[in-house]
Amino acid sequence: MALHTHHPHKLKKHILSLIRACTCINHLQQIHAHAIITSPSPPSSSYHAIITTILTGLLHLPTTSIHYAKLLFNHLYNPSIYHLNSIIRAMAHSPSPCNAITFFTSHMHTHRPNHYTFQFLLKALSLSSSLSLSLSVGFQLHSFAYKLGMVSYTFFNNGLIHLYSLCGHVFIARQLFNEMGQRDEVSYSSMINGYVKSGELGSALDLFKDMPELGSPSAWTAILVGYSDNGDLGSARKFFDEMPEKDVVAWNAMVSGYTQNGLYAEAIFFFREMQKVQNLKPNATTMATILSACAGLGALDTGKWTHAYIERKGMKLDAFLGSALVDMYSKCGEVELGLQVFTGLKQRKNLCAWNAMINGLAIHGRAAQALEFFKQLRKEGIEKPDQITFIGVLSACSHGGFIDQGRAHFYNTMKIYGVKPIVEHYACMVDLLGRSGFLDEAEEVIRNMVIKPDIVVWRALLGGCRLYKNVQIGERVIAHMEAHSSGDYVLLSNIYASAGRWVDVSRVRKMMQESGIKKVPGWSSIEFGNVIHEFVSGDKTHPRYGEIYEKLDELKRKLKKEGYLAETGMVLYDIEEEEKEEALGHHSEKLAIGLGLISTPPGSTLRIVKNLRVCSDCHSVTKLISLIYGREIVVRDRIRFHHFNYGTCSCKDYW
Ligand code: ZN
Ligand code: ZN
């Protein structure tokens, strides 16, 4: 940095222009040091001009140092409200926005705040993580501004409306709104937003209709978000089509509405439409939502394409997008790629990323590795494991059959981190104990639950009862269960069947028929060439169904040669939710595999997603297909992944 000019006035001008060109704190500090060394004592007015400019320059840097700004502020001979406001604004947008309030209160006796001060303070409150604190400070600021005669400023009131409704006091916000002398678009949209956030969509709509002109873009978007959050996608879509201006938030609301309601293919379709719009840039939220839609579908090709899109557009791969990618890859059956993303994350990994990784490894049955990552997370000690972490940890123990570790984490480690068990943790524990034959202990865990056991917990125990042919506990479980699905009766009848109690088997079957229990329709899907093909059991709607059924017939002949006998003996009893006895050969996953075999190059991997548990017949057939056709087949069922290869499955027939 060249400061070699000797004319004082020229030097000052030169320094000021240098400061304005600075892009990092180091350079500013160098100039500051130079100013200190060369300035006379007491400091001259030009020294103060330099400090002021350094302060302004500092606060305009993309990453600033609040600590240094405060230091400069204290060096100022006569700091003005402008300087105070600049620091308050910078603090409001820092990771600890509440510091702005503390800074203000320690200077409020020497500086009379103006409307900018209040605006920045309200901003700080609305960004703070403690809403109850924000609310009480908000009330105080409100009365302070009232004393100073500043409550007539529209944007001050808008800030208050935003703050009050953010804190759940939409009623107070509305009172303020009604009393306002002048309302602008922001007043309306803040109020509408407040209603939407507190679930009062009706009031939001009423106010929206009252808006002068056609409403503002942010008010339109707020209503759209309201429809989408309510799951009313029909109205959302209609409203979206009517919107005069659609910004990225509006598009995101549609994409996320579809994703959250399980309409993943629609979400992806919408994203493709979004790309056709000029001057509209999908942001990180869009990409994370699309990745979660890909995860829901198990659509690896689309997921990979999305990953490439993120890189092509130069979007920052931070912990937020990183965890979405890890989650997508593991739910699409490529946990190895998830690992690559995870280890490649340049920024500090947040808990979300760790959780995605640990849970991803767990559903793939890579239990030891999941627990290894958990160990690392604990060792680093930066992030504290939470409930989601322990779902991954316990389900890893359950999939891996690590009974002692499971007990230790459930009974001790969770307590160390103050994590209260939720129903998912109990379900994992009951599953782990049930699978390993500790049925009494599993029942004990349920009995000691502080929350009400749900159907998943009972079902986990029922599964253990079937495995170990325990009729007594099985009957007790069924008596406890409130909502029965066909699957539960199937499990019970299986327990009876395994104990040879045929009379009870037919009794349960009769109960099932009489109660008119609805079966959960089972489906399987397969993705290739960016298209997802869905099948239900015995499906004949696919355009290539003739060829698929031919392939399955060929398969049957080949299987016979291999000495395979369909598990018809079990069929009567071991039926899953979707199954019909006669349809055994045409279960949805078999149809999906059939389509995969005739449509993809020999030797390539087939990826199937199934919404229910894989039945034992499909499981053994898939093992043989992997051997006969030399294909790796990855099946994601309701709970976990099965990697079929060379005639075996990664779950070791334990699922
Ligand atoms: Zn099946
Ligand atoms: Zn398996």
Image (cartoon, rainbow, N blue to C red):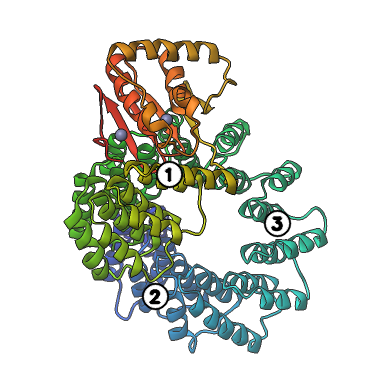
Give the camera-side residue of 543 and 158: 543
Return the mark for residue 503: 1
Identify the residue under disc 3: 219
Quick check: is the Cβ at mark 3 less than 8 Å away from ligand 1? no
Give the camera-side residue of 360 and 516: 516
Residue 412: give x, y in percent of width and height. 21, 67
Neighbourhood count class around disc 2 (C-alpha, 10 Å): few under 14, some 14–19, many 20 upward: some
Say whether residue 425 is left or right of residue 90: left
Give the camera-side residue of 47 and 105: 105
Residue type of the residue flagged with mark 3:
Ala
Above-or-below relation of 204 to 363: below
Of the numbered discs 3 and 1, the one sitting upstream in the chain is 3
Residue, x 74% and y 62% (percent of image)? 202
Residue 192: name its quadrant: bottom right
Above-or-below relation of 384 to 72: above
Residue 196: name its quadrant: bottom right
Q: Kindly report the distance in space between the C-alpha atoms of the residues bearing marks 3 and 2.
A: 39 Å
Say whether residue 24 is left or right of residue 402: right
Say whether residue 492 is left or right of residue 211: left
Neighbourhood count class around disc 1 (C-alpha, 10 Å): few under 14, some 14–19, many 20 upward: few
Identify the residue under disc 2: 73
Ligand 1's quadrant is top left
Residue 557: give x, y in percent of width and height. 37, 10
* Circle 3 SS class: helix
Query: Can you name the residue that lies furthest to the front here?
Result: 503
